[in-house]
Image (tube, grey):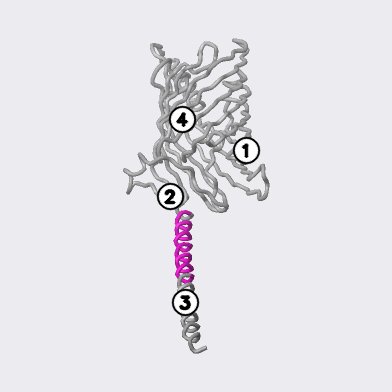
């Protein structure tokens, strides 16, 4: 019995030693697991805070972003989504394809009814550079030339982002309109124009946003326009997105209203005409009336609604009418489908 006591004490000590080491090993494992979980949580938190590209582009870091690959905007339920409207130039960059249909009633003082189909590709190359391509197909019904169908003019644009943050975008763009449409068949203007635009977008809170732009359009080739050698363009729009929760098809509805217009400068004057003294006063009064009519600001109002569908698909409809008595057209009906990719 006495010989067995040391053996039993040895076995008991060995068992206690094993249990102690096992406990320490378990505690070390728990500590390591906790440290690992903490590290993972920190990484996930960092990713959530920095998911996507944080827009912080300005004049102070103007050399940054020109070679940075473009990434989609991060949005939440409190911010207004950066989605284009119908006619006004968007200030932000989106990678998307857009299908437009426009019906114009009594265009050019009632001379024609026009159906226009267009496909616009907007492709950001970097955070600060984007290109736009927009060809058109027209169906024009005129009393003089009958019905004509074919390709219209093509618009190309190169845009640059000047300022951008989470709440605003300010960009500029150089636009060229190429006369690919047949002017004799009323499918194009028959003139090359170049323009420069400055567009602005700002989040007003509560999913409301304001869009605005200014621009000029100058003819550089082809026949001179009958009304002006330079067009001053402008526009402003207000939109409000209403979120629809727990709906698999429609994520939001955005009513909006656009106000667009332009004014012509540098009216063409006839050359080589002799004016006699007796006719000067009458012609002067007529010229004043014509110039007053021609130089009037042409303003159009365009209310519409955008349906924000699933998978970054948007459908827009709108109805545009002139509000200052112009005979440029009677009304326009807009329909557009936008798909981000």
Q: Earlier in the sequence, mark 4 or mark 2?
A: 2
What residue sits 57% from the left and 50% below the top? 207
Please say if the residues under marks 4 and 1 sit with CB atoms less than 8 Å apart: no
- Give how far apart the Cα atoms at labels 1 and 2 are: 31 Å
* Local secondary structure at mark 3: helix
Task: Check disc 3 and report the residue beneath it.
Answer: 20
Q: Position of residue 95 (x, y in %)?
A: 49, 36
Task: Check disc 2 and report the residue beneath it.
Answer: 54
Mark 1 vs mark 2: give the one in front: 2
Mark 4 vs mark 2: give the one in front: 2
Q: Quadrant of residue 185?
A: top right
Tell me, yes or no, whether the highlighted magenta stretch contains residue 69: no
Mark 2 vs mark 3: give the one in front: 3
Please say if the residues under marks 2 and 3 sit with CB atoms less than 8 Å apart: no
Task: Check disc 1 and report the residue beneath it.
Answer: 304
Q: Main secondary structure of the magenta part?
A: helix
Can residue 149 be spotted in the picture? Answer: yes
Q: Position of residue 194 (x, y in %)?
A: 40, 26
* Local secondary structure at mark 1: strand
Q: What mark, if any, has residue 132 been given in the picture? A: 4
Q: Earlier in the sequence, mark 3 or mark 1?
A: 3
Relative depth, front residue between 248 and 78:
248
Q: Position of residue 38 (x, y in %)?
A: 46, 63
Please say if the residues under marks 3 and 1 sit with CB atoms less than 8 Å apart: no
The residue range painted magenta reads 26-47
């Amino acid at each position: 019995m006495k010989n067995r006591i040391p053996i039993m004490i040895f076995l008991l000590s060995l068992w206690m030693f094993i249990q102690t080491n096992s406990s320490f090993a378990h505690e070390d494992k728990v500590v390591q697991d906790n440290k690992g979980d903490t590290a993972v949580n920190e990484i996930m938190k960092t990713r959530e805070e920095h998911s996507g590209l944080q827009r912080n582009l300005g004049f102070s870091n103007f050399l940054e972003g020109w070679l940075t690959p473009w990434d989609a905007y991060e949005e939440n339920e409190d911010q207004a989504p950066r989605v284009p409207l119908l006619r006004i130039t968007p200030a932000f960059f989106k990678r998307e394809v857009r299908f437009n249909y426009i019906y114009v009633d009594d265009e050019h003082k009632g001379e024609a009814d026009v159906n226009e189909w267009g496909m616009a590709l907007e492709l950001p190359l970097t955070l600060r550079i984007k290109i736009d391509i927009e060809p058109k197909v027209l169906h024009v019904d005129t009393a003089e030339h009958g019905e004509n169908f074919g390709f219209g003019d093509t618009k190309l644009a190169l845009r640059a982002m000047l300022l951008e943050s989470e709440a605003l975008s300010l960009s500029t763009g150089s636009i060229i309109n190429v006369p690919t449409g047949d002017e004799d068949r009323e499918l194009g203007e028959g003139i090359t124009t170049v323009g420069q635009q400055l567009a602005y977008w700002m989040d007003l809170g509560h999913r409301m946003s304001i869009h605005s732009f200014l621009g000029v359009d100058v003819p550089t080739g082809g026949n001179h326009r009958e009304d002006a050698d330079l067009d001053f363009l402008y526009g402003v729009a207000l939109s409000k997105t209403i979120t629809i929760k727990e709906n698999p098809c429609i994520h939001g509805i955005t009513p909006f209203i656009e106000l667009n217009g332009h004014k012509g400068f540098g009216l063409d004057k006839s050359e080589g005409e002799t004016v006699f003294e007796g006719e000067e006063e009458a012609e002067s009064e007529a010229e004043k009336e014509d110039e007053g009519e021609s130089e009037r600001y042409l303003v159009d109002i365009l209310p519409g609604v955008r349906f924000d569908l699933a998978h970054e698909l948007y459908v827009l409809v709108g109805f545009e009418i002139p509000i200052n008595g112009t005979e440029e057209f009677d009304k326009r009906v807009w329909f557009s489908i936008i798909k981000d990719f």
